[in-house]
Image (cartoon, rainbow, N blue to C red):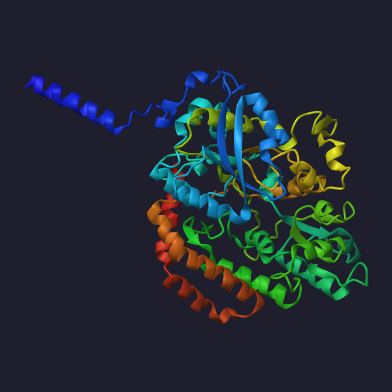
């Protein structure tokens, strides 16, 4: 009997080994094939003997050829890893990416290729994308340190099955100006001319806008626009904290501040009250009447001409080209119930930064190759380049060389950067740090405005949740219809096309579209996120 038992145990062990596919402790068979002896035990070079990997990436038409780009040529010398880049413009990105996935014609990795959470989970479960948990632990000490220091990042990139399928783009949690995004600005000269203080409540803001419309401060030959925006969403993003909405930054759900339960924001009384306030501003022509159709260039031109009394945007000194100090940053407005906060973005800017496929023969090397960009030095290299070649260190910090900032060919800053660096317009995997990111978020005016907002920033910011396949089916059908309907009705309520007397009909319609199932999905996703 004892021999029979031992024989059964042996058979069971052999069956388990067969079912495991011979995987190593890294959790995928690709690592077993990889020549791990070729990896070095230091940052650089990544491998002892040169290797070549293929990457599929999104690309701007003016990006230049990454197979002969300064930053990648330099990194190849540092790492011993040559990357064969396939650059795909945004216009055909989704089509070509999906075709490659459907045909299993996979590169070694997808790099900033616009993969949605649904795609990551779907193809991860199917085996086209490999799980990275163990690879990160063993070959990405720098990313591992970030995940340990900021647990919310790990929570954001972990899928329902417990796996991590992509190396993310992380916005440094200390880089508040970036996390804040667009923020409120006021024309200080008009405030002075009107003898008014900067508004601190929704009523004071209404009074200021009304005064601008009636008195037309500034150049009397130019019609003053009380609030000028390029879309209504940025104004709403600022105002929602005045009505107790979106404290966690999610567009459709939050925790009800009175009950601490998950709620669907667009059917709440607080949301209705906010829309009524925005409708009042629009109806009295205190908001530019073409806010739903204005082109971005026209918006910027109006700002440059000094037409706006207030706006929600990025640093006007940089974007409008106005004289320094004309616009000053404001604070969140205290609303009718005393709410006064501003929600910031989650530290995970994009979850799909770098995805390794089942075709990759060197997954550990790829993870090690990417890991450098989660360091201080790697962030500087990614966004600034090489000292003496693309940037110099000065008493005031780091600055691009004169050839980039004052192009001898009359090119813009972005155009000169695209000839050398790979980050412009892409949001690549790695970490974005304030000292090296040269966007408008690091202008003196933006940093000063952020200091004013800091006391009002929400403590918690949710990422985009991850969902199971069944949950995604609900979100892709009923969920998509509900969110589209909410957006359409939001604008109709604001412009007055639909009166607020129809509010109850609007709520009933959303319930009939499947809101209960939608909220069950969101509750499950929130519970998983909380427990990660």
| Quadrant assignment, res 222 | bottom right
* Residue 213 appears left or right of 128: right
* Residue 225 appears left or right of 123: right
* Residue 495 appears left or right of 393: left
* Residue at 75% in and 38% down: 420
Q: How many marks?
A: 0
- Nearest the viewer among 177 and 123 is 123
Is residue 435 in sight in this rendering?
no
- Nearest the viewer among 312 and 415 is 415
- Nearest the viewer among 390 and 443 is 390
* Residue at 68% in and 61% down: 234
Q: Is residue 386 above or below residue 416?
A: above
Instruction: Say which quadrant the N terminus sits in.
Output: top left
Q: Is residue 135 above or below residue 408?
A: above
Report x, y in % for residue 358.
Answer: 44, 37
Report x, y in % for residue 335.
Answer: 66, 63
Q: Is residue 189 above or below residue 407?
A: below
| Quadrant assignment, res 76 | top right
Report x, y in % for residue 124.
Answer: 43, 43
Report x, y in % for residue 498.
Answer: 59, 80
* Residue at 46% in and 37% down: 359
Residue at the outermost left position:
1
Instruction: Say which quadrant the C terminus sits in.
Output: top left
């Amino acid at each position: 009997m004892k021999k029979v038992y031992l024989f059964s145990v042996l058979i069971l062990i052999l069956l388990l080994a067969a079912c495991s596919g011979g995987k190593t402790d890294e959790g995928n068979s690709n690592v077993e094939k990889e020549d791990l002896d070729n990896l070095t035990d230091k940052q650089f070079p990544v491998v002892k003997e040169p290797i070549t990997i293929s990457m599929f990436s999104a690309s701007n038409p003016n990006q230049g050829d990454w197979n002969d780009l300064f930053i990648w040529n330099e990194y190849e010398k540092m790492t011993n890893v040559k990357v064969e880049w396939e650059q795909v413009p945004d216009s055909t990105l989704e089509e070509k990416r999906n075709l490659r996935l459907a045909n299993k014609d996979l590169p070694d990795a997808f790099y900033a290729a616009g993969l949605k959470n649904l795609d990551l989970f779907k193809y991860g479960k199917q085996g086209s994308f490999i799980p990275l948990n163990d690879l990160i632990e063993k070959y990405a000490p720098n990313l591992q340190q970030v995940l340990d220091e900021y647990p919310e990042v790990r929570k954001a990139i972990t899928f329902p099955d417990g796996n991590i399928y992509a190396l993310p783009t992380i916005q440094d949690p200390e880089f508040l100006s970036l996390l804040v995004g667009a923020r409120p600005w006021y024309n200080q000269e008009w405030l002075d001319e009107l003898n008014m203080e900067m508004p601190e409540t929704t009523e004071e803001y209404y009074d200021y806008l009304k005064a601008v419309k009636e008195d037309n401060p500034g150049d009397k030959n130019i019609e003053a626009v009380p609030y000028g925006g390029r879309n209504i969403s940025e104004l709403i993003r600022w105002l929602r904290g005045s009505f107790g909405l979106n404290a966690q930054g999610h567009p459709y759900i939050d925790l009800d501040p009175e009950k601490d339960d998950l709620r669907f924001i667009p059917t709440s009384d607080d949301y209705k009250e906010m829309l009524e306030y925005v409708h009042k501003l629009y109806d009295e022509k205190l908001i530019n009447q073409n806010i739903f159709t204005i082109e971005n260039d026209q918006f910027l031109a109006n700002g440059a001409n000094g037409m706006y009394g207030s706006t929600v945007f990025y640093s006007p000194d940089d974007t409008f080209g106005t004289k320094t100090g004309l616009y000053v940053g404001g604070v969140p407005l205290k609303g009718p119930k005393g709410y006064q906060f501003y929600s910031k973005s989650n530290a995970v800017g994009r979850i799909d930064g770098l995805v390794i496929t089942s075709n990759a023969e060197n997954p550990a090397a790829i993870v090690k190759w990417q890991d450098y960009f989660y360091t201080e030095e790697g962030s500087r290299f990614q966004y600034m380049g090489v000292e003496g070649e693309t940037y110099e260190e000065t008493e005031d910090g780091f600055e691009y060389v004169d050839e980039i900032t004052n192009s001898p060919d009359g090119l813009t800053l972005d155009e000169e950067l695209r000839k050398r660096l790979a980050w412009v317009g892409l949001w690549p995997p790695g970490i974005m740090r304030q000292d090296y990111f040269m966007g408008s978020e690091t202008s003196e005016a933006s940093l000063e405005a952020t200091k004013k907002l800091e006391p009002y920033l929400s403590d918690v910011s949710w990422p985009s949740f991850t969902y199971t396949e069944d949950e995604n089916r609900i979100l892709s059908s009923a969920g998509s219809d509900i969110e589209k309907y909410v957006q359409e009705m939001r604008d109709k309520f604001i412009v007055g096309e639909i009166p607020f007397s129809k509010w109850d009909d609007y709520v009933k319609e959303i319930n009939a579209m499947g809101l209960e199932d939608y909220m069950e999905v969101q509750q499950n996703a929130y519970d998983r996120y909380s427990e990660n």
